[in-house]
Amino acid sequence: MPTEEGQDLIDLTREICDKTLRPQVDEAERAAATGEQFPTEVFRTLGEAGLLSLPHPEEHGGYGQPYEVYLQVVEEVASAWMSVAVGVSVHSLTAYPVTAFGTAEQQAALLPRMLSGAQLGAYCLSEPLAGSDIASMTTRATREGDSYVIRGRKAWISHAGHADYYTTFARTSDDGGRGLSCFVVPADAEGLSFGTPEKKMGLHCDTVREVMFDDVRVAADRRIGDEGQGMAIALSALDAGRLGIAAASTGLAQGALDLAASYAKERKQFGRAIGEFQGLSFLLADMEAAVTSARATYLHAARLKDAGRAFSKEAAVAKLVATDAAMKVTTDAVQVLGGAGYTQDFPAERFMREAKVTQIFEGTNQIQRLVIGRHVLR
C-alpha cells in the first residue's frame, strides 16, 4: 500500500486530472488529429506538481517514490488523457539511463532539469528497420577527439520536435548487440532534424516523428555508461517502460469502463436502465474483471522492482495482460454504448483507437510472449 505521502500524490494527480486534463482532452485530441498540437502546458503543470520525477532518487531532484506509486499516478493520468500518460512514461524512460547508469557528475549536471518539469525528453531507440531487433540498429556514433559524431535515423519517436533532449542509442562498434552506446543529445544540437508527424489512428497529442542525425556532434561526457553498454541500458529501461505502458493501459481501460457503466445506468430501454439486463451486466462484469486483473499484474511487477528483485518476466506479463485488457475493454465499451459509441459524441471510440497501439509499442505483444516463454522454459 502507498505511504501517506504516496497516497497524497495519487490524490493530487486525481485532482489535476479532474480540473485540468478532462476538461480539454476531447477538444485537444480532435484538434491534433488535423494539425499538430502538443500539450506542452499540461506537461509543465505535471512537472511543477512533481509528477514527472516520482520514481527518481531525492538526491537527484526526484521524489524518491516507489515504482508502485509512480505507476498508480500514470494510471490516473491515463484514465483522463492517454496521450499525456504515454508522455509521462516516455519522459521517465528518458531520464532512467542517467539515474541508473550515469556518473555522479552527469547526474548533477543533467537530472535537476530533467526531473523538475523544465525539460521534456524523447527516447530514440527504434529505427525504420530496427524495431524489436535492437541489435540491428545502424545509427552510428563515431568518436572524434572529445566528442562523438552521430549519423542515422530514428523512427516512431514520441515528443520529436518538442523535446528538450533526446536519449539516443547508437552503434559505436560493429560487435552486434555489444556495440551499442547511449547518449543524451540536446535539442539544439546542430544537424538534428525531424520528419513530418505521423498520421496515426489515435493518441493524436502524442506527436511521433522520425528523428534525423546528420553529423550531430555530442560531447563525450554526454555518453551514459561505457561504450558498448547501450544494449544493457536499453533493455533495463524497457523493463521499466513496459510497466509504464501497462499502468497507462489499465487507466485507459478504467476510463472506458467508467464511461460504459455510467451510460448503462442512464440509458433506458423497455422501461428500465440497460445495465439491469443480465446480458449487459455480465459484459460490464467481465470488463471489471479485466481491469482488476491488469492492475494486479502491474502492481505485482512494481513491488518486485521496488524490492530489488528480478521483474523482467513480470513486466512482460503486465504489458501483455494490461494492453490486451485495454483493447477488449474499450471495444466492449463501444458495444455498451451501441450506436452512440460509434460517434464522436462520446469518447468511447477514441478510447478504442488509443488502445490498439498499446499492443504494439514498447515491444509488441508477440515479443512479450517470446520473453515470457523464454523465462518459463529456463
Image (tube, rainbow, N blue to C red):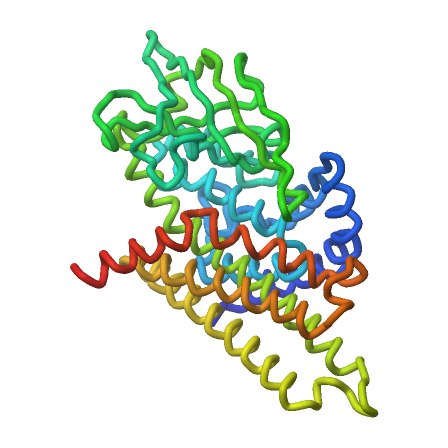
Q: Is residue 137 above or below residue 313?
A: above
Of the pair 118 and 184, the residue shown nearer to us? 184
Above or below 237: residue 189: above
Q: Give percent across and percent down for residue 153.
A: 46, 23
Q: Quadrant of residue 366?
A: bottom left
Q: Identify the residue at image location x=43%, y=65%.
A: 321
Residue 34 picture quarter: top right
> What residue is rendered at 33% in x and 14% in y?
142
Name the residue nearer the viewer: 42 or 275.
275
Left or right: 337 in relation to 370: right
**Extreme-top residue of the structure:** 145
In the image, residue 148 above or below residue 292: above
Q: Is residue 83 above or below residue 193?
A: below
Residue at 30% x, 36% y: name it: 231
- Tally of numbered discs: 0
Query: Quick check: 295 left or right of 97?
Result: right
